[in-house]
Amino acid sequence: MVQTWFPLLLGAALALTQPPSPLGFLAPLPLVWLLTRGGFRFGMLAGMGFWAMHLVWLPLSFVVLFETPWGAVPYLPLVLIKAAIWGVVFGLTRGRPLARAGLWVVQEYLTSLGEIAFPWGFVGYALVDAPGRLLASLGGVYLLSLVVMGVALCVYAAWQRLRKDPVVFSLPALGLFGLGLFWLGLWVMPLPSAQGSQKALLVQGNINPLRKLEGASAEETYLQLTRQGLQAHPDTTVVVWPETAVSGFSPELVALLGSRELISGLETGLTNRAVRVYGGQITHYYDKNRLVPFGENFPWAEVLRPVYRFFFRALGFHGDLVSRTPGTGHTPLGRYGAFICYESVFPAIARRLVLNGAEVLQLGSNDAWYGPSFGGLQHFQMGRLRAVETGRWLLRAGNDGVTAIIDPYGRVTARIPQRQATYLVGAFGLLQYQTPYVRFGDWAVALAGFLGVIGLRNRAKGTIV
């Protein structure tokens, strides 16, 4: 019984250090055991504990939103698949902690690739509330994952040495003390100030997404809130509306905006689009490249068509849902590196936008699909790190939140409550320098792979099970 519950509890404990939990500073503790114990079975059970806790928002969201218990059905296979991936990594690295840490980060990276990519649950996100997240500007979230697991490995090694030679003023004891100081430093280190010279108006319409699918218009809501915001803050330079805010723009918008820019989501029916509107004209557009698997894109549609049809009916949709057309590039909307909702958990997308000239990031999202669960907050916290990785301000406009402005160091400088129809006004800046992460990309993944190979050269201890 203990052999079953122990890995389950360790996985759940690690999940409790992930966003939106404030317990990230405890992440190395469960990792001390997770990196050094067990094989496939241990990893599978730990993965079940982790993913069941980390993704519990999914059934909570979909059951409430669609008003049917069928909304919980995707939860179980997703947890089992993600847990099986952990099991494989643990099985291959039984008795080899260094290899496990390296391959763990490699599998994080691999989950961001492919048609059904789901890059959730990266260990590095434990540092999203710590000033030490600044390290992401060097090597992205993958470097943060290596740092967190590196601390855990060093704690384990020092503790093992100390158990064999329990001397207070010894090298292992000093090592543990130094590790404690390093970890504490990541949480208390000061960050430079960041001042913005531009002012943005971010509008949060709080529109029910199911009503929008049924054809309800949100245009009047966004026009009214924008009018109120501009009357109170006439020095605003840009207005931001969230993902798929409207399906067209009223002639009234030209007079309302004047000389200001509008960055808005646009529902086209075929693509999920963000546009820049200036002088009454759409001057630039960006189509979402990374589509939500089984939500915007339906893999293996011909083979799984009967299954899709069954669940569409169970969730209250009539007719077949057709995959959207993905975009084919990452072109900024002038100065604005616009990306859309799900894309905020893909570090490479924000990086490419900055490489292509974006001076500020703009994220339009519709997290109303998460319902009353903490899924929207989790999504927001992970996306914050894109500002740090790229060294850019991030303007995040959500349909029902989280609507916020994040500075290049990952601090939330302005934010409004979720699930209210309102607006946010705040300062931001335009920047042109490139962080090491933008310049050199995911080098931390290559380092993790190297550590994995080195670790695998060590002799395994026991079987992979």
Image: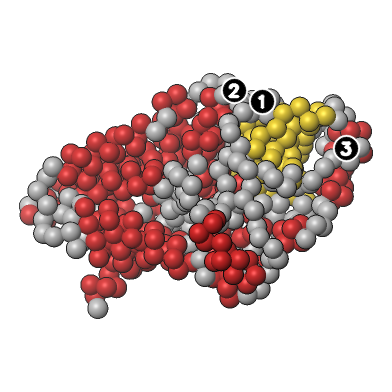
Q: Amino acid at mark 2?
A: Gly
| Vertical arrangement, residue 9 with respect to residue 435, above or below | below
Q: Are marks 2 and 1 in contact (CB under 8 Å)?
A: yes
- N-terminal label among 2 and 1: 1
Q: Position of residue 288 (x, y in %)?
A: 62, 40
Image position of 336 (left or right of 391): right
Q: Tally the marks.
A: 3
| Vertical arrangement, residue 141 with respect to residue 336, above or below | below
Q: CA distance from mark 2 to mark 1?
A: 7 Å
**Farthest front residue?**
302
| Vertical arrangement, residue 8 with respect to residue 379, above or below | below
Structural crowding at the residue carrying mark 2, measured as other residues with C-alpha within 10 Å and reported as few (<14), some (14–19) or many (≥20): some
SS under mark 3: helix
Q: Which residue is mark 3?
A: 253
Q: Amino acid at mark 1?
A: Arg
Q: Is residue 445 visible?
A: yes
SS under mark 1: loop
SS under mark 2: loop
Q: Position of residue 388 (x, y in %)?
A: 50, 35
Q: Position of residue 108 (x, y in %)?
A: 38, 47
Structural crowding at the residue carrying mark 1, measured as other residues with C-alpha within 10 Å and reported as few (<14), some (14–19) or many (≥20): some
Q: Amino acid at mark 3?
A: Leu
Residue shown at the point (50%, 59%) measured from the top left: 303
Q: Which residue is mark 2?
A: 357
Picture quadrant of residue 228: top right
Q: Which residue is mark 1?
A: 335
Q: Quadrant of the C terminus?
A: bottom left
- N-terminal label among 3 and 1: 3
- N-terminal label among 2 and 3: 3
